[in-house]
Amino acid sequence: MAAIPVGALEQSADWEVPEQQIGLWQDAWHRFRRNRLAIVGATVVLLLVVIAITAPLLVHFKLIPDPYTQQVENIEVGPVTAGHLLGTDELGRDTFSRLLYGSRVSLAVGILVQFIILPIGLGIGLAAGYFGGRIDNILMRFTDIWYAFPDLLFVLVVVSVFQQYTFGNVIAQMVMIFGAIALVNWVGLARLVRGQVLSIKEKEFIEAARSSGSPPMKLILKHLLPNSLGPIIVTLTFGIPQAIFLEAVLSFIGFGIQPPTPTWGQMVNSGYESIYANPSSVVFPAIAIGFTLLAFSFIGDGLRDALDPRMRR
Amino acid sequence: MAVISGRPARGALLPSRLVSLGNSRTGSLVVFIIRRILWLIPILFFVITITFVLMHLAPGSPWDKNGGRQLSQTVVNNLNARYGLNKPVYQQYGLYLWNVAHFDFGLSYQYQGKTVSALLLEGWKYTATLGTLAFLLIVPVGVSLGVLAALRQNTRIDYITMGFSTFAASFPNFVVGMLMVVAFSVLLYKWTQGSFFLPSADFALDDHLVLPVITLALFPIAYTARLTRASTLETIRQDYIRTAWAKGLPERLVVIKHVLKNSLIPVVTTLGPLFAFLVTGSVIVEQIFNIPGIGRAFVTAVASYDYPMILGTSILFAIVIAIANLVVDVLYVFIDPRVRLT
């Protein structure tokens, strides 16, 4: 190593030094912003959130009809008739305002389920990855078995069992359905966290932290967790459309949140019975579900590209 | 599997894995398969236990009527005695496990005198037909779309294929199914004359299958196409592909003999989860299209507390998925010699 080429040192001095240091999150945000589809998705979701929050206000100020009021004289009218923008359903309730109200359930399912999944998946994944050995083995076999159970079947059984306990109580129904969906969806996160921990654990900076006497809790909270945060966020984002989908399917089959609370899956289901007379009662909620899921997966794609360090320039 | 044998054995010029292929790999493959088959037992045990416990937590009894006159206490007692529901729960559980070990899944509660096995066999015809047709559609269409998009990267073909896949991968299948019913059976009724599907008609194994199969296959096709595209893109950047081109091989040969052989390996891994998806999907699709298959039988069983039917269906689905995963894992070993058996 004696003969260093003459140009080498000079060249290294020429390396571009960025004027301003860009942090991980700032950098991610830059890249997310450049992704047009992700921005479209984020806009749609933002709009949905605003709609979900303001829907009762809109009803209060009589901008949209009440979603529970039945107008027997206007049963199953088509779009843009008798003051109903998207027509009415089989009980003469306004489809448009039911659609707006339906976003509340879908968004709540999508987002709140992730808050249940997070501690379960994180706990099991961290424990399995950090402690390794027998604990890892037991936890992962448990995860494997859980994974073998078809998710929709499990959710159906759980919901059918607890349905009678929650009869007529919307909040209890929601908690039950959120819980059931979360119970089948934590596996992916647990596996991801374990994999992340396993790979980060071997890195030099962890060794450095350990040799300088960091206690295990500090090691997990200050080093392992922040470094696997990106993939965790991406997984949770992709979990949102999955949860919305499962709830919509449950409602569609008739095991979701019970009527009269409007949900999109339920609207598709009840509209399906009168599909010849009034196809629009199926089309609008179906499209609402489809585009909501599309928007969330655009955001997920954008976040993945933005947060994946391997895609860095 | 012994990838590195340490000392250069016979035929030192051969890569070490070829040397070890002869004896130890075949042996460990057999052990691997046996271990995976034994692994079925705890999975089934878990499925049965969870479902059993959950169902006995349910407050209702299978003899409750939805409205109308309830059965008299004497009749309920007789029914309980007939189906063994008067015994303590742990005895019922033990008895059920014992029977399942002898392939006896019990009597259905909702259809008098019919065994669960007979009901499952009846529905299996529809579900299996649907699943097989979907599978036969998914693999060729998904793979060719993906390869096409990758070989023509950043052209219009690529954009159209990937645009379609993005949509199809995000739109839930029951929404797609609904919209197709609206389009083909309601709005285009004049032209189709209900030949595809009428929500009010009975289901038969003829052209009624078109819409259900498409509904079931759309998401996996999109998923497979995206995956194939990504892995093909990775493969065509490899040196050996450049060599193949440089040798002057025609495109057909390069793609089939060199690219596909390697780029399809990750696609094979998704075939196991694909079966799980087809199972879940069949529940939804059968519900939309009134198909009297197992998925629909499961939903009706859940709605009417038909415990033996619910358990039987869950076991059947779990077995199908587990065997599919096993087959895929074994296939994988044959396709990719680098795989380690664990």
Image (cartoon, rainbow, N blue to C red):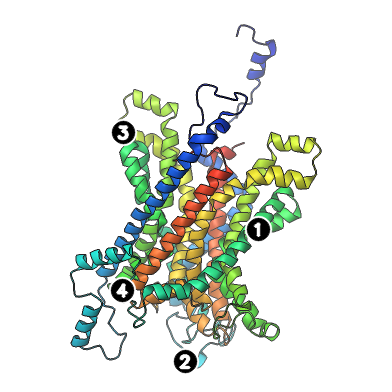
Q: CA distance from mark 4 to mark 2?
A: 26 Å
Callout 4 and callout 1 share a chain? no
Q: How many marks?
A: 4
Q: CA distance from mark 3 to mark 1?
A: 50 Å
Q: Are marks 4 and 1 in contact (CB under 8 Å)?
A: no
Helix or strand or loop: what does disc 4 sit on? loop
- The structure residue drawn at horizontal position 27% and vertical position 82%, both measured from the top left corner, is B63
Image quarter where the C terminus of chain A lies is top right
**Can see residue A58?**
no
Callout 4 and callout 3 share a chain? yes
Query: What amino acid is labelled 1 in the image?
Result: Pro
Q: Disc 4 designates what residue?
A: A169
Q: Which mark is residue A230?
A: none
Q: CA distance from mark 4 to mark 3?
A: 44 Å
Q: Say whether residue A72 is left or right of residue B265.
A: left
- The structure residue drawn at horizontal position 69% and vertical position 13%, both measured from the top left corner, is A7
Give me the chain letter of mark 3.
A
Q: Nearer the viewer, mark 2 or mark 1?
A: 1
Which residue sits furthest top?
A2
Q: Nearer the viewer, mark 4 or mark 2?
A: 4
Q: Which mark is residue A72?
A: 2
Give me the chain letter of mark 1.
B
Query: What amino acid is labelled 2 in the image?
Result: Val
Q: Are marks 3 and 1 in contact (CB under 8 Å)?
A: no
How many neighbours does mark 3 have within 10 angstroms: few (below 14), some (14-19), or many (20 or more)? few
How many neighbours does mark 4 have within 10 angstroms: few (below 14), some (14-19), or many (20 or more)? few
Q: Nearer the viewer, mark 3 or mark 1?
A: 1
Q: Say whether residue A70 is left or right of residue B91.
A: right
Q: Say whether residue B17 is left or right of residue A187.
A: right
Helix or strand or loop: what does disc 3 sit on? helix
Q: Which mark is residue B140?
A: 1
